[in-house]
Amino acid sequence: MELIEAINSRRSIRGYKSLPVPKSVLFKILETATRAPSGLNSQPWEFIVLGGTILANLKSVIEDQYKSGAEPNRDFPIKPMTGVYRKRQVELGVSLYQLLGISREDTEKKMNWMMKMVHAFEAPNVIIVSMDEEISCDQSMFNLGLVTQNIVLLALEYGLGTCIMGALLDYPDIVRTMVNIPSSKKLAIAIAIGYPDLDFPGNNLVTKREPLDNIVTWQGVDQ
């Protein structure tokens, strides 16, 4: 797949077939993805690739935490969005609920959907992107974004879909314990990955992008 086509066609996949991704394919994706640039060639990224019983057990335990009302405590907390950023977030939710047939008043379906998200949308595999606390900083987070972008674009080459998400990492200490990750490793983001279920309505969502004229300032650039 050509790069421009991959960038334009990539979307968040929220419905997967149960077929696991072969380890050889995941290896190739990660091996190529690590060609991402990083400040001073620091390469701060590390990966934990999950599947099978370990992933199923982790999903179940995280679900229990949510249902018990435990307060999330991500290694990298997300600040509440305001203004235009909140507006875009709401538009995403409304569009997705419309595709899924979930009304604003249907709290049961909303909760079921939330649990599906906690289960990484039932993806057969999940890639956790982490870094050592020694190098944890804003620049390193930017570098993790670069390698994550590579992963989700490369996945398309193998007929795979992905969804970049954080819900599975809301309780990082539990994840570290269950997956045997050292406490010095900080969990940044999770990537659901698998073969898309083309019949799942939510996979038809294509999010809008802000017109370029609204977000670019040209200085000293000729017409």
Image (tube, helix red, strand yellow):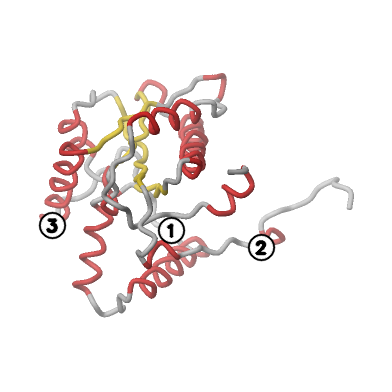
User: How far is mark 3 from mark 1, CA to CA?
Assistant: 24 Å
Above or below residue 109? Residue 57 is above
For mark 2, give the secondary structure: loop
Would you name the residue on which mark 2 appears?
Answer: 211
Evaluate if marks 2 and 1 touch, with contact meaning CB atoms under 8 Å apart: no
Q: Amino acid at mark 2?
A: Pro
User: Which quarter of the figure has residue 209?
Assistant: bottom right
Residue 136 left/right relative to 216: left
| Left or right of 53, for residue 204 | right
**Category of crowding for the residue at label 2, using alpha-carbon neighbours closer than 10 angstroms: few (below 14), some (14–19), many (at least 20):** few
Picture coordinates of residue 145, whole percent (x, y)? 48, 38
Q: Position of residue 162 (x, y in %)?
A: 41, 47
Q: Secondary structure at mark 3?
A: helix
Which label's residue is closer to the chain start, 2 or 1? 1
Q: Tag 1 or tag 3, which sits nearer the N-term?
A: 3
The residue closer to the viewer here, 220 or 189, is 189
Give the residue pinned by disc 3. 67
Which of labels 3 and 1 is toward the front? 3
Per the image, the residue denoted by label 1 is 81
Q: Amino acid at mark 3?
A: Lys
Q: Nearer the viewer, residue 150 or 185?
A: 150
Q: Amino acid at mark 1?
A: Met
Q: Nearer the viewer, mark 2 or mark 1?
A: 2
Task: Quote the CA–CA distance across marks 2 and 1.
Answer: 20 Å
Residue 52 or 167: which is nearer the viewer?
A: 52
Location of residue 124 in the rendering, given as x and y in whole percent from the top left corner: 27, 45
Q: Quadrant of the N terminus?
A: top right
Looking at the image, tell me whether mark 2 or mark 3 is earlier in sequence order. 3
